[in-house]
Image (spheres, grey):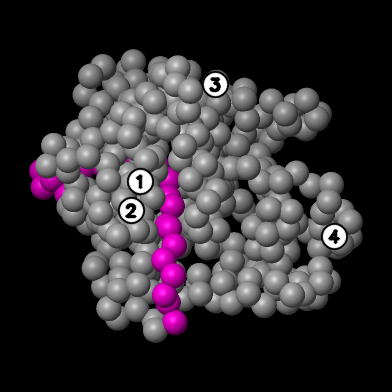
Amino acid sequence: MYLIQIRCYKDPKRLRLDWPITSDLVAVSDLNGNYLGLADLKVVAQLSLETSMIQKLNEWLAQVEWYDNHRLSIILECRRKAYWHLLHRGGLAQRVGPGAHAGSTVHAGIAAYEAGWGRIPESERRLDAFEAMRDTHNRVFGQLREEGFALDSRHELDNLVDIMDTYFDRFLEEDHLYRPIQSEMAMCVPIRPQAGDPLHFTDPFWYILRMDGLWRREATGDLYVMETKTTSGGVKRELTRHQINRQGTGYVWAVRQFPEGEACVGVLVNVVGILKDKRDYARDVETKSQTMCESWRRQTINIVEDWRELLRRAKTLTLQERLDMFYQDDKQCMNYGLCPFHDACYFGPVFAESMPTNTWTPFQVQQPLREAVESE
């Protein structure tokens, strides 16, 4: 596969997960399961090349069948929502709310804080984090301000910076037990038929992910997927929700598909409360067994096969017949606020024609999609 001929390493024996964490990373294998390499996205993007690595990856992504946790979750949530977001006019964009923008601001701070780990003093890393938060906050909330949107006090920059300042204090000692290996890591991993799979599964597809980071426990060498979640609801409730969570299990499975990731034992779940008058955080380790990971893989295959069957049936249907087949789960319409496609369902396809289309991919460096858990 030609995608990674620029700035990559093809010999797994030469690779160690200890590069300076200053860039995004994409691990790529082909559909035969052959390990192809790791591509340094930001370095490549900064080179004055006619076609950058990110562009090549996005061009390739447009030609293959792929699923990420976001797509799989929407398919499971509501068929109609999945139709609007994944199929209609190539897929309609979800409007991102202030809670998700606050999550992006927090993630930017954490990524900047980790970037200087072991190289510069903690106090300087903290200042770098606050600067990254300011830049991200100005960018993601800029359009809302132009539209005259009044920010909730929870989402003001000063409050978010104070939340993270306290967060860094809270986990300062515990963080000495770990070392960040890579921030904002993206992976492309094929899921192809093998012994024990459902008999109707014959066509492979790609599982794409973009995790918050990969950390190593210094005493044991074990690797952990680091996932940070922001919530304006209960922190402990959010932590409990991740005890049974498809996203984390899938990420661990994907990391283990590469020679460097065999030491990955689970997920380090980080929950940050986006609150005004309270500072609340939680962190826990979720170990993922091989049985759990293989079950996740087979479940994902069945989800995709069910979705493929819907697509096959939809080919000969009219628009209204398609909408009726992709039926609504009305319990999702008001779940965590208002569904971004509520008006499309309420007013019909004519309204949907005015909605922007979705252009997000896991390989975008500047504007990753963030999901925040809003209070009900």
Q: Please report the bounds of the magenta region as a residue range.
A: 200-222
Of mark 3 and mark 1, the one earlier in the sequence is 1
Dots 3, 1 in contact, CB < 8 A: no
Q: Position of residue 199 (x, y in %)?
A: 39, 84
Q: Which mark is residue 1?
A: 1
x 19%, y 47%: residue:
260
Q: Distance between the residues labelled 2 and 4?
A: 39 Å
Dots 2, 1 in contact, CB < 8 A: yes
Of mark 2 and mark 1, the one earlier in the sequence is 1
Q: Of the residues tagged 2 and 1, which is closer to the observer?
A: 1
Q: Of the residues tagged 2 and 3, which is closer to the observer?
A: 2
Q: How far apart are marks 2 and 3 (CA)?
A: 39 Å
Of mark 2 and mark 3, the one earlier in the sequence is 2
Front-most of 289 and 2?
2
Q: Is mark 4 on a helix, strand or loop?
A: helix
Residue that label 4 marks: 349
